[in-house]
Amino acid sequence: MRRLAVLTSGGDAPGMNAAVRAVVRTAIFRGLEVMGVRRGYSGLLNGELEPMTLGSVADIIQRGGTVLHTARCEAFKQPAGQRQGLAVLRQHGVDGLVVIGGDGSFRGAWALAQLGMPTIGVPGTIDNDIPCCDVTIGFDTAVNTAIQAIDKIRDTATSHERTYVVEVMGRNAGDIALHVALAGGAESVLIPEAPFSLDDVIRKLQRGVARGKKHSIILVAEGAGSGIEIGRYLTQHTGFEVRVTVLGHIQRGGPPTAQDRILASQLGAFAVELLRQGASAKMAATQGGTLVAVDLETVFTTPRQPDMRLYELANMLSI
Amino acid sequence: MRRLAVLTSGGDAPGMNAAVRAVVRTAIFRGLEVMGVRRGYSGLLNGELEPMTLGSVADIIQRGGTVLHTARCEAFKQPAGQRQGLAVLRQHGVDGLVVIGGDGSFRGAWALAQLGMPTIGVPGTIDNDIPCCDVTIGFDTAVNTAIQAIDKIRDTATSHERTYVVEVMGRNAGDIALHVALAGGAESVLIPEAPFSLDDVIRKLQRGVARGKKHSIILVAEGAGSGIEIGRYLTQHTGFEVRVTVLGHIQRGGPPTAQDRILASQLGAFAVELLRQGASAKMAATQGGTLVAVDLETVFTTPRQPDMRLYELANMLSI
Amino acid sequence: MRRLAVLTSGGDAPGMNAAVRAVVRTAIFRGLEVMGVRRGYSGLLNGELEPMTLGSVADIIQRGGTVLHTARCEAFKQPAGQRQGLAVLRQHGVDGLVVIGGDGSFRGAWALAQLGMPTIGVPGTIDNDIPCCDVTIGFDTAVNTAIQAIDKIRDTATSHERTYVVEVMGRNAGDIALHVALAGGAESVLIPEAPFSLDDVIRKLQRGVARGKKHSIILVAEGAGSGIEIGRYLTQHTGFEVRVTVLGHIQRGGPPTAQDRILASQLGAFAVELLRQGASAKMAATQGGTLVAVDLETVFTTPRQPDMRLYELANMLSI
Amino acid sequence: MRRLAVLTSGGDAPGMNAAVRAVVRTAIFRGLEVMGVRRGYSGLLNGELEPMTLGSVADIIQRGGTVLHTARCEAFKQPAGQRQGLAVLRQHGVDGLVVIGGDGSFRGAWALAQLGMPTIGVPGTIDNDIPCCDVTIGFDTAVNTAIQAIDKIRDTATSHERTYVVEVMGRNAGDIALHVALAGGAESVLIPEAPFSLDDVIRKLQRGVARGKKHSIILVAEGAGSGIEIGRYLTQHTGFEVRVTVLGHIQRGGPPTAQDRILASQLGAFAVELLRQGASAKMAATQGGTLVAVDLETVFTTPRQPDMRLYELANMLSI
């Protein structure tokens, strides 16, 4: 192994830069050359590769987004695109690749590995929707950004004695909503992985009011329904003045938290070590806090859901 | 003058607590008693008054929202409601009132003053839509909250090379949008006080792209149009992937900035001094950094708009 | 079991309020009464107990510090004090106690358990110096506060091309320094658990300069030496302008991070369940992300050190 | 006028980048070329000038520090150095210069103006120690950083019921200490511009304790004495456990606040307009919110002090 490449793909997540930095510096520390691919698989197909140095990744550990940029790429979902990607990597003398991204990005990584390019995936997505790992890079930052928003909304909810519906990201996974609800002290949380009834939400609101509670926050994962529609339903059926906020893209950005920077540093370094050991088609991850290499095929076929004990805990603590 | 009362009314704004604290502590320092009215004019009509002490306002200077709570009150817009409010204040031995809020709250303050209750208004609203003063309490915090959001959105806009439309608060006033656009380095800003054409926005976007600029942020004040509709229009007419975020109620909350705490402290203390001097139907404000008492009637009849030189500056700097 | 009590003891840590809330709400959910002890063991000896309700712990999950207050208490280190503490608890009808704090607090908890009061410890300290658990409540917040400070210092270090020494908390444990160094991209880190030589630090600085690196940050754990003295040594032996910052008590406060709120919620609830199951003299903790009850005697006798693989990683990535 | 140059000098301040951006973009908007001088006057003497484009200043408005870097320069205090600086500017075809910095930087600017190079100063320093202007660039950010620290320290001060001494920056000016004390609700503030007695501070502490107040924060400006020595004195003379924090260099960095970005944008643009109008040896500033050009000689000879009414207000509100 002489020359690695690294790319970020799919939705950006805070900590991706820390992972890129760890890949680059570990590679150089191990005497390898390393190239950065810009714009994910799309840039790969266009040959957007450039050599990375220690200086290329200076002062980026604290930046949100990804200095390599990212993009979605339909062409790379097809065998022709994947073969072309392999050819570009070979042209640039690359003999190992680290792909930082989510499930879709790992499909491309797996395809390249099947074609003979040693490839390791690093889980980077704010959604935390990757199985077989404790947590994905970016999740902790997204949750902290959202609870800072919740803390602000609680100020105005309390002052006006109002009910707020807050929709957070998570098309397929309720992890952000669940963690934010628990950490933000929300009164109810609606996630795609658990059945819910808006009438139960209303009964809980009314019980709270009967007990003197004058404001409430209801967390909704994107995948569990539209915050705006849920707000409308609650307004119609309670007579309360219900306000809705859709947090949106602020959850993607910002300086990564300590945990995301450290996890990204660990996984980026570990991905390089795995490649040096001859591994391929693996995900670098932590399980129970320990670094592990998981077969990408296992990742693809393992169902996952959030920690449902946290769901029960959130419900118990919001009595 | 022996006993003052203080209330917060209308939309809550960060710094209202610092103003309440300043009213209470200045009154006590001057040997006066002071009562807090809960829930604005609505609570006044219900007789929700309680004595305030130095301890009542300890550790609140840094809190968003208002510990006195706030509410809208239709009844107080009518002469009967106003007379009832006067009666409640008289029953509690109150001989001077400080009202912290926006334009609507000042109408009520003025009515009470006309009925003979010495009343001073303190401008507290995130919208900055009060004439005859440099700035309102809460505006600086709201703008800083919004630029922190913009900084996060810029991370993901840059990584994905996308155009973002961000809608900020301001139904009647473009001040938040304008300050956020200037401070956030937005590429365009749409406010109700200035005519704009979406086709100009598109031309500017395309000029940027031609020059190699791959991402853009377009700020929209609530009062200038719907962010979602503007995003849809831009998507249709450019072929770019335009994303929309409506910042919403996070702009109302959070710990106030230093400037809001200091302004609130100054105005709260000054309002008490004005009452002690026998003033009534005035707004306590700063003009050019100097404390001034402005007739509420002047406030009601003076047109205002944001500093349009900042609008020109924002446009010049976003070339 | 009919009535629990909860206290916070030792140095305060962000997340203690979330733990108190979880204890109170879980107890009430389980049909138990719960009392709060103010000022730790000191307040216990003075009989400062008061009933807690759902409302007592409303809106505290996001607050730093501890609403129960905390104090150091010499008298409780003696058997006489411990017996008195037991008597006070018995007088108040308490038949189970949750103690949130660090190692010293656990000694008191263990003593009460030996005297027959079922007692569970919850690890709350910013230092992370408790063995047999993944992490202590407050550590994540302290580390994030410190990296936000490092990010700021890096701005001025870069602008002035200077070397900064930053001393962080950790009298006995290098965990904060190590995590901050790794997450902050520091050039060197000095912790009590690893031998170091200032001359190695100087050689690394000089290698950096030779390579064109113009600024550096050196992290020092309180327990590894005085930042001020280390700064003086480096200035004398390098000729560089070395600046020193001692972060100090800002590391103790502030709204807890999501992780600290969630961990505290889990451990507080789990502590109540353990008491209900008849357990005593245990620490409620997570190991590999799983809730476990650890004998306090095991906690007292297990040596610990930070994850030294992170130390190696920090050194590798700062080449 | 065909080609401008811009430099940052002296201590860095958040918002300097926004000012550089405004100079560069305004110059380009007006059809001028613009060069950036690296490392202040020191870099000027070394000929470290490079052309700036719209892209050079993209994505810097939100960054602390200065992308042009800064340095102190003894040589430029001498006429020989100043003549050499002029020669370098002439060699590069520069016919107008903007200097962003504090008092020392303005001395250099004035010298260049006397030698015939049109030069405008822009006040950028966190200390706010420049007369004839409302506020300097960087001050608002430094104050907000410090109050965020105070808010954290208050959490732990409250929990432990302790007295804290917090030393903030300000060797010659008490502005930071004064604004932070007022905005942070500190119990006492010691600044170089006002005589104070530590025994008065002690009496106030004791009055507070007598009234049930269990924690206090005492703000000390660097120029008013050493926080550590003051803490020692208070400990010795009160028997309280007094803790000391010296905030240090975190006050210099971080993303600038909205106000600093906007002020910097205004002043940077105005400096270019002044040069275009043929002005020289002026400071671009705001007075009462209005843009004004002040003779540098007036700046040098006008005494200044903080707004002492804020000092009285801080004392009144901390009763």
Image: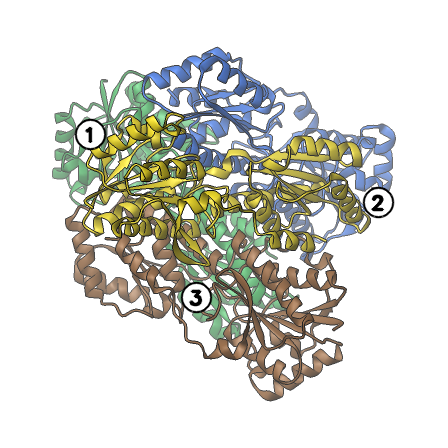
Chain colours: A brown, B green, C yellow, D blue
Residue at (35, 53) in percent of width and height: C266
Identify the residue position indicated by label 1 in the image: B50
- Chain under label 1? B
Q: Is residue B31 depicted above or below C60 in this figure?
A: above
Q: Position of residue D241 (x, y in %)?
A: 46, 22
Say few, some or many: other residues with alpha carbon within 10 Å of mark 2 (under 14 / 14 to 19 / 20 or more): some
| Up/down of D222 relative to C235, above or below | above
Q: CA distance from mark 3 to mark 1?
A: 48 Å
Looking at the rendered structure, the kind of residue marked 1 is Glu
For label 1, the crowd category at 10 Å Cα-Cα, with few meaning under 14, some 14 to 19 and many 20 or more, is few
Quarter of the N terminus of chain A within the rendering: bottom right
Q: Which residue is mark 2?
A: D47
* First reached walking from the N terminus: tag 3 or tag 1: 1
Q: Which picture quadrant has residue D247? A: top right
Q: Is residue C295 visible?
A: yes
Chain to which mark 2 belongs: D
Q: Is residue D278 left or right of residue B223?
A: right
Numbered badge on residue C62: none
| Rendered location of residue A213, percent (x, y) | 21, 47
Of marks 2 and 3, the one in the foreground: 2
Q: What SS does tag 3 mark? A: helix
Element at badge 1?
A: strand
Residue B230 image label: 3
The amino acid type of the residue labelled 3 equals Ile
Where does the image place residue D46, in percent across and percent down from the top left?
85, 42
Where's residue B278, x and y in %? 28, 20
> What is the spatial separation of the Cα atoms under label 2 and label 1, in whole angstroms?
69 Å
* Nearer mark to the viewer, of 3 and 1: 1
